Amino acid sequence: MFRKFSREDVHSRSNVKSSVQRTLKTKLVSQFPDLEPVIDELIPKKSQVELFKCEDKIQLYCVDGEVLFFQKFNELIPTLKFVHRFPQAFPTVQVDRGAIKFVLSGANIMCPGLTSPGAHLPEAPGFENDSLVVITAENKESALAIGRLLMSTEDIKSINKGHGVELYHHLGDCLWHFNVD
Amino acid sequence: MSLKSVVYCDVCTYPLDYCEFSGKLKRCKVWVQEKHPSLYSKYYDDAAVEETTSKLAASSIGDEREEKLEKDLKRLQSKQENREQRELAKKLSSKVIIRREARTKRKSMVAISGLEVFEIDMKKLAKTFASKFATGCSVSKNAEKKEEIVIQGDLADEVEAYIHKLLEEKGMKDVKVEKIDTKKKKKPTTNADGTPAEE
């Protein structure tokens, strides 16, 4: 999604009303219930959320000069900076070491990279098809990418072929390097 | 429940775990050692490295693939280094040109070109000049279709000093800054006051 993205793609920049900010926060909590105890720390009540409307109907939300989450359609997608601060709240899958290189250059994740001994998938029932996942790697602490499941985790285990996760945002892509000012 | 703060590497901007995949590992290591010695020992200390490699051999992707990965990473790194060297050489060989042009009577303007190599935001710099010198300043295309900053008024000396400072901040002390005067009446550098000493 952010393979090519720069300042020129930002069409408008505006401050968000505090009431909208409240609904955003409740929406985030409803998407990721584990965020609830820390949401006020992540997005303080007094802070000013900024909205960047960009090319392709992408909307970036930004707090204190850092992009914290973005939106393509209805769903809010956290950025890696946000995930790194509170990783436990998000559904997570782990890839093996061999896959890191490809993920960092923006490739979709193939099933074998998620099922090999170094990787880790949640136990059954796992995650549904189409849900957002944070991707971590073998022997690494922090997340390296965010994507959407193209099949449910159980399917990944049983089929074990083809694309498993569609990548949205990874370390070193244009959104990662995007500087607000 | 509290928030975590992840340390990001200044060199490659990744979290420290992923420095090895950025292709700039050598410089990352130096940076980490300098800024976060405790973290350095965690990631790069011999014992820790040995431990992870043994773990890798036990769990992960097989020796063969691991070797291949290592090779790929090395190649990436050398590629990256070459590119950086090229860029640095380009930066050092290029020079900034400050040109003063005469307008009517005693009026003149200053055009600065050759800045684009140094990743300087021209528009922003133009704005700073405008407010710093309280004058008109803009970015425009010159005869060679390159961008240059045009400042109203005879400010060549002040601009030169400012650019020297800017380049020094970027660690590019040896870059040449050349002053050209297209007006013949006045001498270019009278070295009165406020002129910076040439290196």
Image: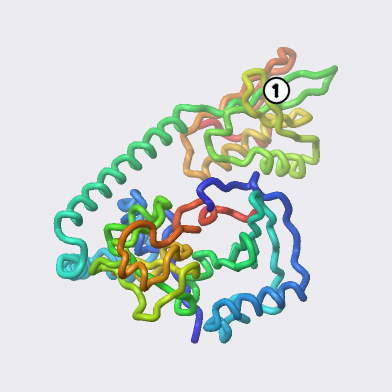
Q: In percent of the image, x 57 and y 33: which residue is there?
A: B116
SS state under label 1: strand
What x and y, as percent, mark residue B129? Answer: 72, 40
Question: Residue A75 is drawn in which quadrant?
Answer: bottom right
Q: Amino acid at mark 1?
A: Arg
Residue at which label 1 appears: B100
What x and y, as percent, mark residue B1? Answer: 49, 87
User: Callout 1: 10 Å neighbours few (<14), some, many (20+)?
Assistant: many
What x and y, as percent, mark residue B138? Answer: 74, 34
Above or below — where is B172 with respect to A138?
Answer: above
Chain at numbered mark 1: B
Lateral position of residue A78 relative to residue B134, left or right: left
Question: Residue B111 is drawn in which quadrant?
Answer: top right
Lateral position of residue A171 relative to residue A78, left or right: left
Lateral position of residue A123 relative to residue A87, left or right: left
Q: In percent of the image, x 71 and y 77: which residue is there?
A: A22
Q: Nearer the viewer, residue B174 or A128?
A: A128
Q: Nearer the viewer, residue A88 or B107?
A: A88
| Residue A5 in view | yes
Q: In percent of the image, x 47 and y 63: which residue is there?
A: A147
> Quick one: which residue is furthest to the right in this view?
B105
